[in-house]
Amino acid sequence: MKDIVVAGAGCAGLSVALALLERGVRARIVLVDPRTRFERDRTWCHFELEPHRFSAAVTHRWNRVRIAHPAGTRTLRVARTPYCHLPADAVYRAALDRLARAPNVSLRLGERVLEIEDRAGAPACVRTDRGELRADLVFDSRPVRPPSAPGDLVQSFAGWFVRTDLPVFDPRTATLMDLRVPQQGGVHFIYVLPFSETEALVEDTWFASQPLPIERHETFVADWLAAAGVHGYSVLAREQGVLPMARSPFTLQPSPRVVHVGLRGGAARPSTGYAFVAIQRHASALAAWVARGMATGRWGAAPAPRAAHVGWLDRVFLARLTAHPERGAELFHRLFARVPSDRLVRFLSESFSVRDALSVMMALPFGPFARQALRELAPRSTATLAPRADRTSWP
């Protein structure tokens, strides 16, 4: 039996392990993670265009989403593809419960991966603070600083889960972007997920060249609540993070036996930060790749997390956003105001057609974006793949 090591048991690592089980891969799977407890440390959201392995963990669905701008507010009705909320602890619990029942899976908690070495002619060596593991294949989902080029942006955010003294929220409508906040130095908005009339996640988000200090984010959250007339409230929990918005390619497969997954492999869409559905799709594609390789003995390059044309469109948008951040709020307002809701949802979810993409492109200033699109047509990939695609033995 072959051995697979998954470095990191976050969303991507757990999803890959589950996908391997779903595909019937009989290799021994070892997940290594420095945590000893899996708590609610983040929130994932997505539009429900397709079922996925964590659909039962969705805790809230919104049939309407809106974007607020000084020029006006646009509300989209998305009942056919509702906006879904998944708290991290529900995802972790669902994954760990399933993995615990699999006889070929072991979870090594409280253990940190220090180094992964892949040399020709030998299994990969995964060095941890407790020793070494040998693996025929390694999926590496450890946190990493993303690739960057001059002018690349990051998405930084911090939010509060609040409970108010009085009913103030509309639990039917999620606010994806409230752009009626200061816009200096980047794209700035407040994100609001109302779970009831008195409970919501209120999050401050910036697309900028450098992440904001958490204290500044939280000041903007407090200011927004005050401006909305919310004075009596308690903070139940907090979350914060930084996501890459890099135009540079990620390294997907640095060596034959090592594959990067999750944020390390470029799963987060650079233009939006959405990652959850992309992680699920990529996990399924990787599991199919492993099953096919084990059955045939032939291993091509590992599949990338998204299609090349999606990366191209993101680079076009981010290049314009980087060059003119002061126009970012207006660009997002135009998208929501001029693109039909179903087309926009498919575009944001990476399930769009040519007509959907054209609808989005026509909503934006045509001349500048057309010129940038031509500049980005130079051949390049969204991920750096392993050079050999014709291996005839296990990686």
Image (cartoon, helix red, strand yellow):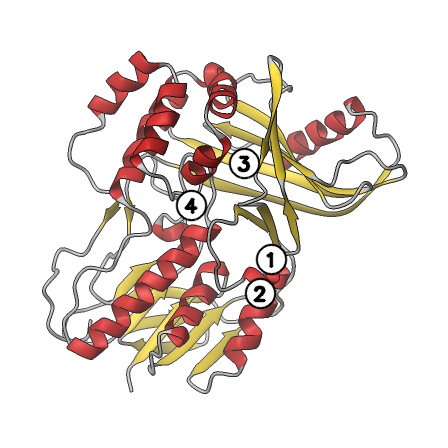
The quadrant in which residue 316 appears is top left
**Callout 2: few (<14), some (14-19), or many (20+) C-alpha neighbours within 10 Å?**
many
Report which residue position mark 2 lands on.
92
Whether residue 130 is situated above or below residue 49 in the rendered picture: below
Q: Which one is in front, 216 or 175?
A: 175
Rounded to the nearest angstrom, the CA distance separating label 3 from label 4 is 13 Å
**Callout 3: few (<14), some (14-19), or many (20+) C-alpha neighbours within 10 Å?**
many
* Label placed on residue 268: 4
Tell me the kind of residue under disc 1.
Ala
x%, y% of residue 209?
A: 45, 27
Tell me the kind of residue under disc 3.
Ser
Q: Is residue 339 left or right of residue 206?
A: left
**Callout 4: few (<14), some (14-19), or many (20+) C-alpha neighbours within 10 Å?**
many
Report which residue position mark 1 lands on.
88
Report which residue position mark 3 lands on.
156
x%, y% of residue 246?
A: 37, 36
- Helix, strand or loop for disc 1: helix
Q: Nearer the viewer, mark 3 or mark 1?
A: 1
Q: Is residue 104 left or right of residue 377?
A: right
